[in-house]
Image (cartoon, rainbow, N blue to C red):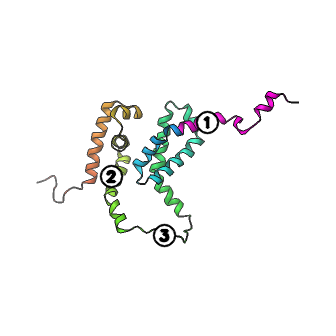
């Protein structure tokens, strides 16, 4: 017959061996959810999409939780996962949309006002995407400073660079964004 101690250990689901991992993961996710949302919002235009991107990243974090915990900087690793999920969010949705069957409910067609509201963001989004490909450190410094509102020291700690390097990357990133968004004037060449 089992002793009282042995039967108590098997009493309920709260005593499963992997429960500390679940608790640690839940605490980590809850304590950093606002930060993860800020990252997602900086890449996406819609709070609902940002929340969904964070949930997508959380699923990946959960599957890689032991690896995240053993990382030298678990928060930086998790932030990178949220960043990647946010950057790829619309591409993933487009791939999924190819396999979806539309419902005959209420279709939403964008109005002219909807399109006009988004008009100014398109060029900036394209410039940010180009900068991300060409100079990812500059793009990340600009994003953390101006979209997430981080201070130079915070950015330096997050990216493991000096505050001076952060300032330089921000300066160069802003100049590159401006050059990408302002097309050269026609007729202005090197030979005048």
Taking the spot 32% from the left edge, 35% from the top edge, the residue there is 166
For disc 1, the neighbor class at 10 Å (few under 14, some 14 to 19, many from 20) is few
* Residue labelled with disc 2: 127
Q: Secondary structure at mark 3?
A: loop
**Horizontal and vertical percent for residue 189?**
16, 55
Magenta-drawn segment: 2-29
Q: Nearer the viewer, residue 80 or 3?
A: 3
Q: Front-most of 166 and 31?
A: 31
* Magenta span includes 10: yes
Judging by the rendered image, the residue that carries numbered circle 3 is 107
What is the chief secondary structure element of the magenta stretch? helix
Q: Is residue 84 magenta?
A: no
How far across and down, in percent of the image, does residue 165 sit?
32, 33
What x and y, as percent, mark residue 30? 53, 39
Q: Residue at x 24, y 54 (%)?
A: 182
Give SS at disc 2: helix
Quarter holding the C terminus is: bottom left
Instruction: Tell me the residue that label 1 is attached to.
Output: 23
Counting residues from the start of the chain, the first of labels 3 and 2 encountered is: 3
Residue 39 in the figure: left or right of residue 74: left
């Amino acid at each position: 017959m089992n002793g009282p101690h042995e039967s108590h250990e098997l009493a309920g689901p709260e005593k499963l061996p992997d429960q500390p991992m679940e608790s640690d993961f839940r605490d980590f996710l809850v304590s950093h959810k606002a930060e993860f949302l800020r990252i997602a919002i900086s890449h996406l235009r819609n709070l609902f999409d940002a929340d969904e991107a964070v949930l997508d990243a959380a699923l990946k974090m959960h599957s890689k939780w032991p690896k995240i915990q053993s990382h030298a900087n678990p928060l930086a690793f998790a932030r990178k996962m949220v960043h990647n999920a946010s950057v790829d969010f619309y591409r993933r949705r487009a791939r999924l949309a190819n396999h979806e069957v539309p419902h005959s409910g209420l279709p939403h067609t964008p109005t002219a006002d909807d399109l006009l509201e988004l008009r100014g963001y398109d060029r900036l989004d394209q410039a940010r995407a180009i900068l991300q490909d060409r100079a990812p450190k500059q793009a990340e410094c600009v994003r953390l400073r101006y979209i997430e509102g981080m201070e130079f020291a915070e950015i330096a700690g997050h990216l493991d660079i000096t505050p001076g390097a952060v300032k330089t990357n921000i300066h160069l990133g802003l100049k590159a964004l401006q050059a990408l968004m302002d097309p050269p004037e026609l007729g202005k060449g090197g030979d005048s």
